[in-house]
Structures are given as structure tokens and as C-alpha cells.
């Protein structure tokens, strides 16, 4: 639940893929549905509300960091850069960073949704006419080719805000960080938002708000499955659950069945036991040293770090380790 709804919604894929992913996920002994399917229109609207909640510190803390330190980040990244943003969601943080960069050559918003991608480009281009805006429609979890700007950049840097990396387990995170290292190459770097380990009560409160908006957000997945896949989930028979697994350093989020029950999705039938859990997403938390170690294994060396005043979240700058 770390990235913007627009970022997640654009990964929804086709209805056929949705059906197959749901059927496959519910067939596992530990039932699960990919988190990207939380973000239909209503899910995205609910996530917007979540970001405004008192308990949900992540968005607020990252904006605080960007407001205070974007000029320092720009100096750290250096002049002549081609900046590649993974999952070009809200342009607010992007603008802070672009304003702080010394003489950037190009900005490459990267997204899986062509429509959103070009909307982002259209909104930014008039205000940054000295920067070539080169949108690329691609999935950042897969390999893709960078565009060639008219003016040759001195180096490439990836910007990955939103602590979205937390939705991936450490193995997948390391794989993605390795791809980023290869993409940037010698002289390149990564600027990334990472949610930090902190008091368990503060972490769990962010995913269990008093107003119940996060519960509505998670339950909306069942509503979507009913509507789009001809299913008969009883929404009253499931509830939202988000618990911090301290040994694994992650929030485990999903839906728990209140009773033994049977659910139909089209012609398929699924049995649920009382207390059985449908996992929908993880949110991994790190110390700065833990994440730096993960990145080091992928060829990235930590150079600078910035946190909000409460040290809830960090934005970290890594440089490609040419010796890796």
C-alpha cells in the first residue's frame, strides 16, 4: 500500500489476467491475490483518502523530506543527469526534485499505463522546457530500453519514490535493485524512498485507521471480484486484518474469513475455513543499514541519507559501485 493508486492501478492488466490470477491465488493452501488488483476506481479513491489520514504517515513524511532536502538531493545526483522515475505517480515529489537538479538533460517518466504516462508528461513539460521529457511505457519489473535524449547526459539516475519497494519481498527487491544498477551503469545512481522500522503501534496504526478507510479499501477487492468475475463473496463474512510480523520486518495485510464458507467464482468453487486468511499485500520495513546491505549486494553503495524529523521514513541516495 505504499505506492500511489495510479501507479498500482496501471498494473491491473486485462480481465482475463485478473481472473486467472485470482483463481490461481485462491487455489494455494495459503490463499492470496496480487495487490495490484486492489486499485480499481473505487480502490484508488479510497487510497487517496488513506493518504490524508492522521495515522498514515508515509506520504506526509516523504513530502516533508522532499520539501526540506530536494536541493541537497539534486546536488548529490549532480549536473547533466537523465532522471528516470519508476512509476510516475503524483508529480508533486517529482517537481521538488526537478527543481533541485542542476542542469538536468532529460526526465523519463516510466509507467505501464500509456494514458497516465502521457498525461504526466503533458503536465510537466510546459514548466520544464529546458528538460527533454521522454515518457516510456514499460513495466519496471522487466527489462526495458532507455530513450536517447538530444543532448547527451553525463549519467543516469533512477528516482523511485513512495517506499513502493516495501511491497516486494527482499529477494524480489534485490532483483529489482540489480536491474536498476545495470540500467544506470557507471556513474549512475538511485534515489529511493524507504519506510523505516519504528514502534510497532505506529506501524500497525497506519494500516488500521480509526475511520476504517483501510478496511474498506481491502474489502473492496472482494466487491471488485464479485462485480467483474461473477463471484458471490459475502463481504459481511470477511474483515480486514493488518499485523506487523516483527521477525520478518513486514506488515502482512489481507482478509480473514469469519466462518466456514464456500465461495463461487464463475464455475469454480472455493472453500474457506473460519479464520482463514487471504493475503493481499506486504509492507516491508527496514533500518537504513538493512536496506543499504540489500542494495550493496546488488551493486549500489549508500552515499547520502535524509529522514523526516520523526525518523519514520528515509530517502536514500545510492551510487553504482563500479567494482561490483
Image (spheres, grey):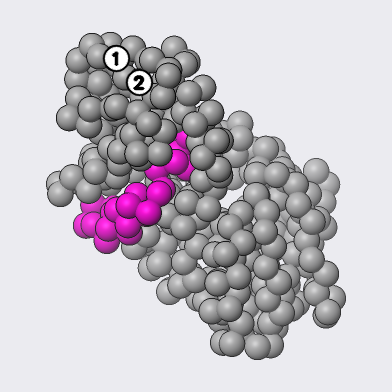
Return the residue nearer the eye: 146 or 38: 38
Residue 115 drawn at (x, y percent): 57, 64
Q: Is residue 206 above or below residue 319?
A: above
Question: Seen in the image, is 277 located left or right of residue 201?
Answer: right
Q: Is residue 153 above or below residue 188?
A: below
Q: Is residue 214 visible?
A: yes
Q: Secondary structure at mark 2?
A: strand
- Magenta segment, prevailing SS (helix, strand or loop): helix
| Residue at the image position 55 percent from the left and 43 percent from the top | 14
Q: Residue furthest left?
A: 210
Return the residue nearer the eye: 91 or 287: 91
| Residue at the image position 15 percent from the left and 49 percent from the top | 211
Q: Is residue 205 visible?
A: no
Q: Secondary structure at mark 1?
A: strand
Please identify the quarter of the rendering in which residue 84 is found: bottom right
Mark 2 Cα within 10 Å, few/some/many (few <14, many 20+)? some
Return the residue nearer the eye: 147 or 57: 147
- The answer to whether mark 2 and mark 1 are in CB contact below 8 A is yes
Query: What's the mark number on residue 264?
Result: 2
Residue 172 drawn at (x, y percent): 61, 35
Which residue position holds label 1? 262
Amino acid at each position: 500500500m505504499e505506492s500511489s493508486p495510479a501507479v498500482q492501478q496501471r498494473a491491473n492488466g486485462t480481465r482475463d489476467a485478473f481472473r486467472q490470477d485470482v483463481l490461481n491465488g485462491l487455489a494455494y493452501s495459503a490463499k492470496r491475490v496480487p495487490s495490484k488488483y486492489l486499485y480499481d476506481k473505487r480502490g484508488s479513491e479510497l487510497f487517496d483518502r488513506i493518504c490524508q489520514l492522521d495515522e498514515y504517515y508515509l506520504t506526509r513524511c516523504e513530502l516533508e523530506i522532499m520539501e526540506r532536502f530536494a536541493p541537497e538531493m539534486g546536488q548529490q545526483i549532480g549536473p547533466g543527469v537523465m532522471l528516470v522515475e519508476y512509476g510516475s505517480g503524483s508529480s508533486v515529489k517529482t517537481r521538488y526534485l526537478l527543481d533541485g537538479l542542476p542542469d538536468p538533460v532529460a526526465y523519463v517518466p516510466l509507467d505501464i499505463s500509456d494514458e497516465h504516462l502521457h498525461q504526466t508528461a503533458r503536465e510537466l513539460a510546459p514548466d520544464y522546457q529546458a528538460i527533454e521529457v521522454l515518457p516510456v511505457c514499460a513495466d519496471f519489473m522487466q527489462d526495458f530500453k532507455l530513450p536517447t535524449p538530444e543532448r547527451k547526459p553525463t549519467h543516469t539516475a533512477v528516482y523511485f519514490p513512495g517506499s513502493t519497494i516495501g511491497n516486494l519481498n527482499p529477494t524480489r527487491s534485490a532483483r529489482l535493485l540489480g536491474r536498476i544498477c545495470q540500467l544506470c551503469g557507471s556513474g549512475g545512481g538511485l534515489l529511493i524512498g524507504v519506510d523505516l522500522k519504528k514502534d510497532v503501534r505506529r506501524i500497525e496504526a497506519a494500516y488500521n485507521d480509526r475511520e476504517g478507510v483501510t478496511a474498506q479499501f481491502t474489502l473492496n477487492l472482494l466487491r471488485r471480484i464479485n462485480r467483474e468475475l461473477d463471484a458471490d463473496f459475502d463481504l459481511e463474512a470477511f474483515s480486514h486484518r493488518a499485523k506487523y510480523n516483527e521477525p520478518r520486518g513486514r506488515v502482512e495485510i489481507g482478509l480473514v474469513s469469519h466462518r466456514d464458507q464456500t465461495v463461487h467464482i464463475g464455475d469454480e468453487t472455493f472453500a474457506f475455513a473460519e479464520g482463514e486468511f487471504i493475503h493481499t499485500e506486504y509492507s516491508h520495513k527496514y533500518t537504513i543499514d538493512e536496506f543499504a546491505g540489500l542494495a550493496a549486494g546488488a551493486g549500489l553503495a549508500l552515499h547520502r541519507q535524509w529522514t523526516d524529523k520523526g525518523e519514520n521514513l528515509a530517502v536514500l541516495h545510492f551510487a553504482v559501485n563500479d567494482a561490483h
